[in-house]
Structure formats: structure tokens, C-alpha cells
Image (tube, rainbow, N blue to C red):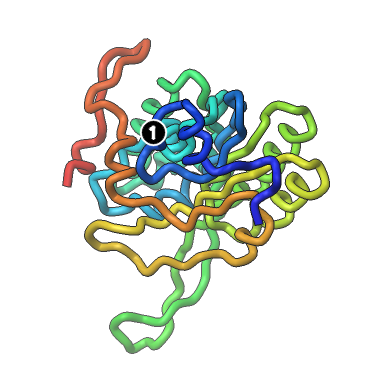
Amino acid sequence: MPEPIFTSLHADYSAGRGAAPEGAAPFCFNHRRRKAIVYVDGFNLYYGALKATPLRWLNPVALSSQLFPAFEIVGCKYFTAKIAEAKDLDGKAKRQANYWRALMTISVAQIIEGHFRVRKTWAKSANPPPDMVEIVRAEEKGSDVNLASHLLYDAFGESFDVALVISGDSDLVTPIRMVTRNIGKPVGVINPQRLSGPSRRRCRGSIALKEVASYYRGGVTWAQLEKAQFPPRLTDSSGEFGPPPEWHL
């Protein structure tokens, strides 16, 4: 159940503050805009909604503002891990660096890095024999811990009125519960699953996240993601640039 301090966004706008945007969340305070910090689980967002689509040039602040227009986004913390250039055989590191460059054109954005752990493991062979082959697997580590730490630190420090977490990772249940129930700060969770468009995966909600969040959204649409793209050309101190050519599908 949403906390009593929340009212319907549509009711809030009907009180004289214009029409509620289509698809906007019923998650806001009355009377004044409240300060929000967005916490983005980068890999969860990428694999849940963006992979193999032309929507990867996504501005997470624009998406959050679209979904929660009643809030003032005062911070955006993007949690991810850097792909090692030495092991980059298909240009992923270069494309990632290009996207990070776009993120840093957002005045309120920060990139908080975890790391990749490379380990050897066994997997079934696609062309046996042998039945099993040894493979090297890179696993992203640290993003969930970093996100949880920043969320708790900011909540204790009164850095936000409301937190918006873009992730479907159930490992975040405990820190979100601590913020909502122990510290008393509201947290909205957006599970970044794409609800429409081609090659859409089967959506799976998180009952655990839904139970601890002040507001839970089970996904985003193709249209919402499309509307929240960076401009095709951006400019920073190094000059003009755009999305990687491979992202134009």
C-alpha cells in the first residue's frame, strides 16, 4: 500500500496544476515539488529494456522526469562497471565510453563504478563431444552494493525527499526496506522491463520489491523509452558527438 503522504498524481493535477501526463505515475506529494534522486542499476536497465534495440541512447533523467513530472530531479547516480579495453574484441568498451560521455552531459549525473570479476567455469558444449567445456565468464560485481550504500547514505543525510530506484534486482529489498520503514523516506521502484515493442522479453515482476517500495512500477513502454532519448548530437568540452553507429538498428 502507498504511504498516506502520497496522493494520486491525477488528483494533484486536477487541483489546478494542469493535465496529468499520459502514463505518469500516481506517486507525488501535494502543494510543492519534492526533490528526488534517481538510482540507476545500469546493467539491469540495459538487459531488461534496451539490449538489441535502437533505444540505448537513453537519458535516465528524462525518463524519470517523464514518469514522475511532479518531482525535481536533483541527482542521478548511474551504477555500472567499466568494460576492460584490453579484452574488448567487439567494441563494447568503446560504445560504453561513448554512452558514459553522454551521461556526463547531464548536470546532475554521476557514474559510480563497480568491477568485473573474471572466472573459469564449466558449461555444456554446443557441439559435443566433449559434453562439457571450460569457459571464461565475466561477472559484474559491486553495483548492487554501491547502489544500496548510496541510497542509505543519502537517506540518512536528508539528501532527497524521495528516491527513485530503476532496478528489478531483489538484492535491493533490504536497503529499500530500511529506507522506507526505518528511516521513513519514500522510495519508488521502476522495474526496467520493456512492456511493448519488438523482441520483448517476458516480464517478471518482483513481489519482494513491490512489498517494500512506496510505489512500484512493473515496466516501461517502448514509447516512453523512445521519448526519453538523448538528442542525436550532443556537445561537451571535447566537441560534438552522437550515439555509436551500431545502435542505429
- Secondary structure beneath label 1: loop
Where does residue 234 sit, x and y in percent of width and height?
Answer: 29, 20
Q: Residue furthest front?
A: 15
Residue 116 in view in this figure:
yes
Which residue is more in the foreground, 70 or 107?
Answer: 70
Instruction: Give the labeled residue for mark 1.
Output: 19
- Going by the numbered disc 1, the residue's amino acid type is Ala
Where does residue 172 sit, x and y in percent of width and height?
Answer: 65, 54
Give the residue drawn at x 32%, y 87%. Answer: 128
Where does residue 97 sit, x and y in percent of width and height?
Answer: 38, 33
Give the residue drawn at x 41%, y 20%. Answer: 105
Residue 91 in view in this figure:
no
Asked if residue 123 is positioned above or below residue 11 in the image, the reply reads below
Q: How many marks?
A: 1
Q: Residue 228 appears in which quarter of the rendering?
A: top left
Which residue is more in the foreground, 98 or 70?
Answer: 70
Which residue is more in the foreground, 54 or 163?
Answer: 163
Which residue is more in the foreground, 170 or 240?
Answer: 170
